[in-house]
Amino acid sequence: MHSNHRKLSVNRASLIHKIRYAARHPAKVAPHLRRTARDAWLRLVHRDHVAYYRAVMASDTARDPAAAVGSRSQERWLALGAMQFDYLKGHGLEPGHRLLDIGCGNLRAGWRFIDYLEPCHYYGIDISPDILISAKRTLTAYGLQAKLPHLTLTRDLTFDFLPDRHFDVVHAHSVFSHSPLHVIEECFAHVGRILAPGGFFDFTFDRTEGREHHVLREDFYYRTETLLTAADRHGLHGTFMTDWESLPHGQSKIRLTPA
Ligand SMILES: C[S@@+](CC[C@H](N)C(=O)[O-])C[C@H]1O[C@@H](n2cnc3c(N)ncnc32)[C@H](O)[C@@H]1O
C-alpha cells in the first residue's frame, strides 16, 4: 500500500517508544506529563468516551481553538482547511450539494465549504459546545452569516435528527483519529440512511500497519483492514484513497459508499 513520510509501524503506546521519544525530544516531556495527568483526571470524571473527549476539547479550546483542532499556527489552520476543501472540490463537490461535516471543529475547512455551497447546504455537527462557539466566531469573521449554515451539538453519531437520503457528501476529517471503534461503528451503522443516492462518506484516520493502539484515549491508530471490515459489516463499501496519500498530511483517507 502507498505510504508517504509516516512511520506506519510505530506503537506510540509502548514504553520503549516513549523512552526513545523522550530522549529525542526532552522539551516535550513536561507538557506530555501535564497532559497525561489532566487526561487521567478527565477520564476519572467522565467515564464515557464522548463526555471525556468533550472535556478534553473544552480544556484545549480555552487555551487555543486552532491548536484544539490540531493546527500549530494560523498558517497551518488555513492550509489544512484548504487541503480538505480542494480535495473534495477536486472530487466533484458542487455548490448545489448538501454536505454533512462530522466533527466540524471551528470551521477550519467548514468556512470554505459554507462559502462555496448554496445557503443552508452545509451542516456541521460536533460534540464540543466550546468549539462550536469558536465555529460561530469563524463564521462571523468571514462574514458568512447569509449562508445560514447549521451548526449543531451532538452527543452520538446516530444522526437520528437528520432526514433520510439527504447528504451528497458526508465528511469527517481528523475525527476518527480521536475515536474508539465503537464510536466509529455507530457512525457506520447509521450513515447509509442519510446519504443521498450517489453520495459518499469520506473520513480520515491515523493509520498503522503494526499493532492498533491509542495514546491517552485521545489519539487512535487503526489498520486499514479493520475499518474496511467494520464498514462492510454495515453494508458500506470502502475505498482507500491513494491520491490523498501524496498530500502533506499525517492521516489516511477512506471513502465509503453503500455496497
Ligand atoms: C481535530 S478536530 C478536527 C475539526 C475539523 N474536522 C477540522 O478538520 O478542522 C476534531 C473535532 O471532532 C470533534 N469530535 C470528536 N469526536 C467526535 C464525535 N464522536 N462526534 C462528533 N464530533 C467529534 C471534536 O470535538 C473536534 O472538534
Image (cartoon, rainbow, N blue to C red):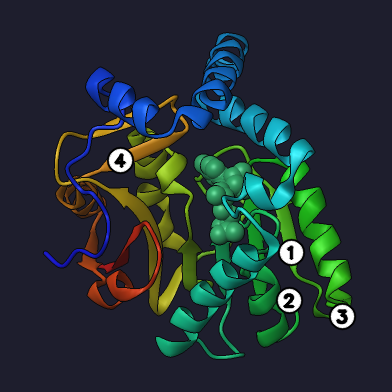
Which residue is denoted by mark 2 in the rendering?
120
Is label 2 in a helix, a strand or a loop? loop
Is label 4 in a helix, a strand or a loop? strand
Q: Residues within 10 Å of mark 3 (few under 14, many from 20)?
A: few
> From mark 1 to mark 2, how far is it between C-alphas?
7 Å
Decide which of tag 3 and tag 2 comes sooner along the chain: 2
Residue 146: give its label: 3
> From mark 2 to mark 4, how far is it between C-alphas?
34 Å
Asked if one can make out residue 92 in the rendered structure from this viewpoint, the answer is: no
Is label 1 in a helix, a strand or a loop? strand
Quadrant in which residue 236 is drawn: bottom left
Decide which of tag 1 and tag 4 comes sooner along the chain: 1
What residue occupies the far left of the structure in this picture?
A: 1
Asked if one can make out residue 28 in the rendered structure from this viewpoint, the answer is: yes
Q: Amino acid at mark 2?
A: Cys
Which residue is denoted by mark 4 in the rendering?
221
Residue 150: give its label: 1
> From mark 1 to mark 4, how far is it between C-alphas?
30 Å
> From mark 3 to mark 2, how far is it between C-alphas?
9 Å
Decide which of tag 1 and tag 2 comes sooner along the chain: 2
Decide which of tag 4 and tag 3 comes sooner along the chain: 3
> From mark 4 to mark 3, how far is it between C-alphas?
39 Å
